[in-house]
């Protein structure tokens, strides 16, 4: 098989269940060996001097893939240690926490993807491995053919209690207290989506929070209740109903491996995407104004106004959580105060937490603030009462039909830029760091609408985001976009045609 087809950005992903499975135990075993050898080269340690932790989410294929990856590590001469059911952020933490201090870590997860998928995420003490490293690991793994190791005794270790202690420290610090029950009086509904994060409800309860109404805490790799995804409408509707039914102060929801999260306020209103970015920005900028907030490219104009009003600077960058995080790290290295990197998907990385994309840490910071504000008779989401949100918002994907899809995509972007540059009624965004973003003055209101078109990194697709502060504005802007691309072949404009009906 072609191992490189398993590459998904900085992760490995594939079908892990069924006759057409591509991510098999044999593949995982080869990747375990490849990682041990690669890590030896990176650290300068011999394989026999390496220890590597492994964890998994609740997926049905998780145990067998974890065992196989451990066997590969074992064959390579390194020591594998299973942390069992865990979260992706905790796996990185296991490489830098005193008393554990693993040389590397592997998390078996496919995030929010269907139950028959799975994947591997790799970590060193410097963080997640880069895109090019994944390609190297897959090429190395393709050269191995390894037998199972039924006699291998896999060491076990419990790390989640240590990770929870890390979260507790943040709550105590945020509330400036050392009491045993710092969250006493706060009612939180937890929805783990039957993923790995169900333990968070117990964690909150131990700190005094009331968690009545929490749901889907039991790990179940079939995900029978809803997709564990903070961007999924059904998942968000489910927790919204649970929060309202329980009369809770707020709800929190995780994806399967807990590197992404969202919340729901006391009225059941989803706080994700731009709202979530605004909320955590307000919390961090309230502590120290003037900071730069790095987001992905599709965030709204209202969010920019909000961050500016809180004394911050909004820095849009390329989509992809690793892109956003790496840019925030670079800005800090250049002396720019940047406390947060966050993508609309819910990936959030705080400087105070090693710039690790950790949904559970994000939620913990917000719960600390929620408790503080409840003690003052206020609501957490009062912080974003003045966030301006669009009247209309659409996200479309135009399929590119040509073989050289990148050439076609760049041609489309250049056509839009050329058309906008010759139209005095349009403004080309000066802070676009991918694709093109065009502002419109709708109904005489300055920059009251915009669309952004970019080229997908891996797929033959042109994603388009459109937002309007005026009813009917999205149709007008999409018509303008299609007019700019008039006569261009190799692109399926059906989504635009449907949206403009």
Image: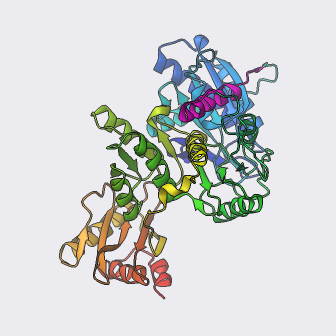
The region drawn magenta spans 154-178
| Residue 349 in view (yes/no) | yes
Q: Residue furthest bottom?
A: 501
Determine which quarter of the picture holds residue 259.
top right
The reply to whether the magenta stretch includes residue 135 is no
Determine which quarter of the picture holds residue 351.
top left
Colour basis? rainbow
Q: Is residue 372 left or right of residue 384?
A: right
The rendered magenta stretch, by its main secondary structure, is classed as helix
As rendered, which of 65 and 308 lies closer to the eye? 308
The residue lying at 39 percent from left, 64 percent from top is 302
Whole-percent x, y for residue 310 in the image: 37, 51
The residue lying at 31 percent from left, 54 percent from top is 433
Q: How many marks?
A: 0
The residue lying at 37 percent from left, 36 percent from top is 329
Whole-percent x, y for residue 66 in the image: 71, 32
Determine which quarter of the picture holds residue 244.
bottom right
As rendered, which of 483 and 445 lies closer to the eye? 445
- Which quadrant holds the N terminus? top right
Whole-percent x, y for residue 92 in the image: 57, 30
Whole-percent x, y for residue 265 in the image: 62, 58
Q: Is residue 217 above or below residue 299?
A: above
| Residue 487 in view (yes/no) | no
Q: Is residue 177 above or below residue 447?
A: above
Q: Is residue 281 left or right of residue 110?
A: left
The reply to whether the magenta stretch includes residue 168 is yes
């Amino acid at each position: 098989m072609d191992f490189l087809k398993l590459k998904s950005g900085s992760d490995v992903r594939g079908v892990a269940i069924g006759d057409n499975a591509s991510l098999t135990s044999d593949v995982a075993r080869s990747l375990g060996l490849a990682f041990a050898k690669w890590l030896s080269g990176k650290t300068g340690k011999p394989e026999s001097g390496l220890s590597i932790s492994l964890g998994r989410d609740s997926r049905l294929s998780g145990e067998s893939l974890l065992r196989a990856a451990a066997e590969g590590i074992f064959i390579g001469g390194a020591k594998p240690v299973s942390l069992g059911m865990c979260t992706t952020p905790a796996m990185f933490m296991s490489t830098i926490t005193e008393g554990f201090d693993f040389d590397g870590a592997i998390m078996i997860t496919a995030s929010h993807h269907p139950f028959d998928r799975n994947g591997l995420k790799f970590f060193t003490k410097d963080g997640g491995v880069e895109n090019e490293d994944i390609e190297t690991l897959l090429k190395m793994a393709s050269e191995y053919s390894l037998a199972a190791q039924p006699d291998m005794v896999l060491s076990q270790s419990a790390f989640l209690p240590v990770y929870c202690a890390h979260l507790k420290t943040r709550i105590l610090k945020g509330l400036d207290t050392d009491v045993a029950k710092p969250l006493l009086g706060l009612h939180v509904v937890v929805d783990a989506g039957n993923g790995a994060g169900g333990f968070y409800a117990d964690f909150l309860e131990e700190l005094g929070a009331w968690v009545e109404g929490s749901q889907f805490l039991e790990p179940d790799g079939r995900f029978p209740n809803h997709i564990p995804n903070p961007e999924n409408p059904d998942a968000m509707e489910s927790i919204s109903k649970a929060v309202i039914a329980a009369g809770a102060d707020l709800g929190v929801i995780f994806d399967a491996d807990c590197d992404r999260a969202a919340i729901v306020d006391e009225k059941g209103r989803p706080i994700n995407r731009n709202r979530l970015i605004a909320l955590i920005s307000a919390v961090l900028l309230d502590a120290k104004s003037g900071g730069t907030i790095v987001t992905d490219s599709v965030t709204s104009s209202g969010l920019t106004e909000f961050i500016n009003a809180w004394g911050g600077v909004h820095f849009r960058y390329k989509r992809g959580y690793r892109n956003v995080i790496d840019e925030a790290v670079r800005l800090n290295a250049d002396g720019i105060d940047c406390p947060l990197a966050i993508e609309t998907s819910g990936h959030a990385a705080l400087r105070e937490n090693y710039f690790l994309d950790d949904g559970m840490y994000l939620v913990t910071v917000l719960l600390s603030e929620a408790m503080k504000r409840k003690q003052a008779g206020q609501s957490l989401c009062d912080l974003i009462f003045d966030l301006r949100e669009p009247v209309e918002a659409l996200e479309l994907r135009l399929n590119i039909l040509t073989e050289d899809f990148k050439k076609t995509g760049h041609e489309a972007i250049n056509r839009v830029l050329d058309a906008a540059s010759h139209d005095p009624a349009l403004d080309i965004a000066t802070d676009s760091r991918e694709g093109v973003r065009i502002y419109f003055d709708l109904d005489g209101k300055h920059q009251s609408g915009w669309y952004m078109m970019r080229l997908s990194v891996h797929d033959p697709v042109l994603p388009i985001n459109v937002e309007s502060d005026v009813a009917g504005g999205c149709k007008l802007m999409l018509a303008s976009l299609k007019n700019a691309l008039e006569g261009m072949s190799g692109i399926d404009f059906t989504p635009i045609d449907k949206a403009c009906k």
